[in-house]
Image (cartoon, rainbow, N blue to C red):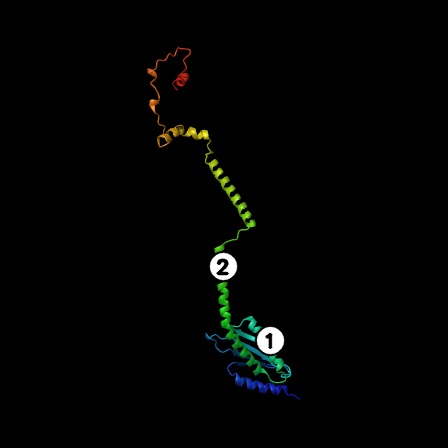
Amino acid sequence: MTDYAEEQRNELEAIESIYPDSFTVLSDDPTSFTITVTSDAGENGETVETTLKFTYVEKYPDEPPLWEIHSQENLEDSDLEEILALLQQQAEENLGMVMIFTLVTAVQEKLNEIVDLMKNRQEEEKRRKEREAEEAEKVAFQGTVVTIENFLAWKANFELDMAELRRKKQKEEEQAGKPKLTGKQLFERDHNLDTSDIQFLEEGGNNVEVDESLFQDIEDLDLDEDDPDFDPLEMGSDED
């Protein structure tokens, strides 16, 4: 008949000698203890760590011990899930034999793998942030893509804004007592408007030159203005 208590005591003594600095007994009944497992240092000195809590059941090692992750440092949730799955696998493979050292060793190797992957994770995170920055820059450069829907919405808002501006301007003019002047009121306000065409001609408009030689002195002509047949227009035609 298997003496489970004896096997558990012997393993506990061996574990304490193997992990003197990271082994801590929490209780004697049931026997419960923790072992802190730390990875080897990575390329840049980074490490990960977890503290495993084990509790013997009555028929251990014919039945697996209870375990849980007591604490951790620098591990992702996905890492913790993989560690728990690894413990389950190793426990099933080692039933009938004391297995704490085997379980801890498997976790130690897993932590070393995680440290090796940390560099890849960091590089991937860096690339992800660079992609996000590039996408944000593209959006800022391109602005909002114009569609029929957002153009019509913009146009409606624009027309409302312009109508509001016109309303405010009209209200301000009414409050200031300055109604819009008609053309007649503008003319009456500025009497120079009636000479504007003359000023334009004097300042460089189309000047008309008259050849006075084309005309005769009217006083030199022997005209009988009392003659009923006198017709200046007919005279002009005779001269032609």
* Depth order, front residue of 107/21: 107
Residue at image coords 50%, 67%: 125
* Labelled disc at residue 161: none
Residue at image coords 42%, 30%: 189
Q: Where is residue 169 in the image (x, y as percent from the top left)?
A: 48, 39
Q: Name the residue under label 2.
A: 136
Q: Position of residue 87 (x, y in %)?
A: 59, 78
Q: Residues within 10 Å of mark 1 (few under 14, many from 20)?
A: few
* Depth order, front residue of 75/144: 144
Q: What residue type is labelled 2?
A: Ala
Height in image: 217 above or below 142? above
Q: Which sits earlier in the primary sequence, circle 2 or circle 1? A: 1
Q: Is mark 2 on a helix, strand or loop?
A: helix
Residue at image coords 46%, 30%: 183
Q: Mark 1 points at which residue?
A: 85
Height in image: 57 above or below 205? below
Q: What is the quadrant of residue 240 in the picture?
A: top left
* Depth order, front residue of 112/3: 112
Q: Where is residue 67 in the image (x, y as percent from the top left)?
A: 59, 78
